[in-house]
């Protein structure tokens, strides 16, 4: 297939297919090709926000965010500015529609679009199966809505009134934690423990927004970490140091008034939510679902007051495990 020029509007079904495929498979957000594709999409939207293909452009941007895994696009500012300007130009025009696909065609439970963005593109430009009610799709308010959807995906926290998809699996899954917690480790459990611990320490030192999520993952590992299966004082010391740093960060948080906090008893029950807590986009996606369907608010999930207490409880167990381990080692030395 010939290389697509992102500065030109595709002039055939094949060219649309090629561009939509490239959007969906785009990776390497710092590469020149990625930037060219992104800029092509925002320029086209800016040039013709009422045109027949107007909706394809924000959807192209949205498709390209899959590789970001819930993090913000580096140097997102011009992209966000272009999408915001388009939304402002298009929004406010009266229409007869009760609602629009940018809200109705999102599955809040699965935190995913009912059609993938690139599939929506092909249907809009007329090379895929026809859309139900195409006027509703082409409505300027819908184009404006998807421009905000794309801006929110490019830079989490930009718009509050649009759905947020869960980060694609390019992000950090937590299955490897399950393996350790449920005692079926494929790799080296120490590596998992130390890996999580170092991320926690880093987040605590930087006071990063991801700190609460990392307290959750480290506390989830506690049944393994504080068990007799860990025979390394050094590993325990690393975990203790990181949790102490995290607990210190949480210390100053005023007592909260949340009615409830997540139940962190069985990791498999909350693993998917815990994954969402690790990235800005994931937290925004959780928030959208909670607002749409109910459940524990994001603020209670990331509550530093509560997680400070969880960290202290974990520290008690870990210090005890460390004392047992050193006592055993001394006994073995004496024997
Ligand atoms: Zn409308
Ligand atoms: Zn709380």
Image (cartoon, rainbow, N blue to C red):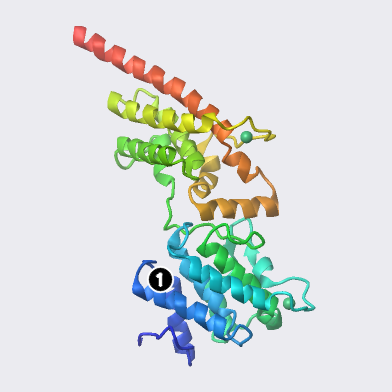
Look at mark 1 in the image and give the residue it sits on: 26
In depth, the one of 147 and 111 nearer the eye is 147
Q: Is residue 129 left or right of residue 136?
A: left
In depth, the one of 250 and 163 nearer the eye is 250
| x and y percentages locating residue 188 in the rendered image | 29, 38
Q: What crowding class fits label 1: few (fewer than 14 Cα within 10 Å), some (14-19), or many (20 or more)?
A: many
**Marker count (numbered):** 1
Task: Quadrant for the N terminus, please.
Answer: bottom left
In the picture, residue 54 is in which quadrant?
bottom right
**Which type of secondary structure does the marked residue at label 1 adopt?**
loop
- Can residue 116 be seen here? The reply is no
| x and y percentages locating residue 316 in the rendered image | 45, 20
Image: 330 above or below 169: above
Image: 229 above or below 192: above
- Can residue 150 be seen here? The reply is yes
| x and y percentages locating residue 8 in the rendered image | 45, 88
In the picture, residue 185 is in which quadrant?
top left
Image: 149 above or below 303: below
Q: Which residue is depicted at the point 58% across and 81% down?
A: 123
Quadrant of the image where one finds ligand 2: top right
Is disc 1's CB within 8 Å of ligand 1?
A: no
Q: Which residue is depicted at the point 66% across and 81% down?
A: 138
């Amino acid at each position: 297939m010939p290389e697509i020029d992102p500065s030109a509007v595709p002039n055939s079904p094949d060219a649309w297919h090629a561009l939509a495929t490239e959007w969906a498979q785009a990776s390497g957000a710092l590469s020149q090709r990625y930037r060219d594709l992104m800029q092509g999409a925002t320029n086209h939207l800016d040039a013709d926000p009422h045109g027949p293909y107007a909706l394809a452009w924000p959807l192209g941007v949205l498709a390209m965010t899959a590789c970001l895994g819930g993090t913000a696009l580096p140097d997102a500012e011009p992209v966000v500015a272009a999408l915001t300007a388009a939304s402002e130009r298009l929004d406010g025009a009266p229409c007869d529609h009760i609602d629009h696909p940018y809200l109705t065609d999102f599955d809040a439970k699965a935190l995913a679009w009912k059609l993938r963005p690139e599939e929506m593109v092909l249907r809009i430009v007329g090379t895929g199966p026809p859309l139900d009610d195409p006027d509703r799709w082409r409505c300027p308010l819908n184009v404006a809505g998807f421009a905000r959807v794309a801006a929110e995906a490019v830079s989490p926290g930009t718009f509050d009134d649009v759905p947020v998809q869960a980060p694609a699996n390019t992000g950090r899954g937590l299955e490897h934690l399950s393996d350790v917690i449920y005692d079926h480790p494929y790799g080296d459990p120490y590596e998992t423990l130390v890996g999580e611990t170092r991320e926690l320490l880093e987040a605590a030192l930087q006071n990063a927004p991801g700190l609460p999520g990392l307290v959750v993952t480290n506390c989830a590992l506690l049944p393994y970490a504080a068990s007799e299966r860990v025979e390394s004082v050094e590993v325990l010391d690393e975990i203790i140091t990181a949790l102490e740093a995290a607990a210190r960060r949480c210390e100053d948080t005023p007592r909260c008034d949340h009615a409830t906090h997540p139940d962190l008893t069985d990791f498999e029950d909350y693993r998917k939510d815990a994954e969402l807590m690790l990235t800005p986009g994931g937290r925004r996606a959780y928030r959208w679902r909670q607002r749409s369907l109910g459940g524990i608010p994001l603020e209670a999930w990331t509550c530093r007051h509560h997680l400070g207490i969880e960290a202290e409880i974990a520290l008690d167990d870990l210090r005890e495990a460390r004392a047992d381990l050193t006592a055993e080692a001394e006994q073995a030395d004496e024997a």
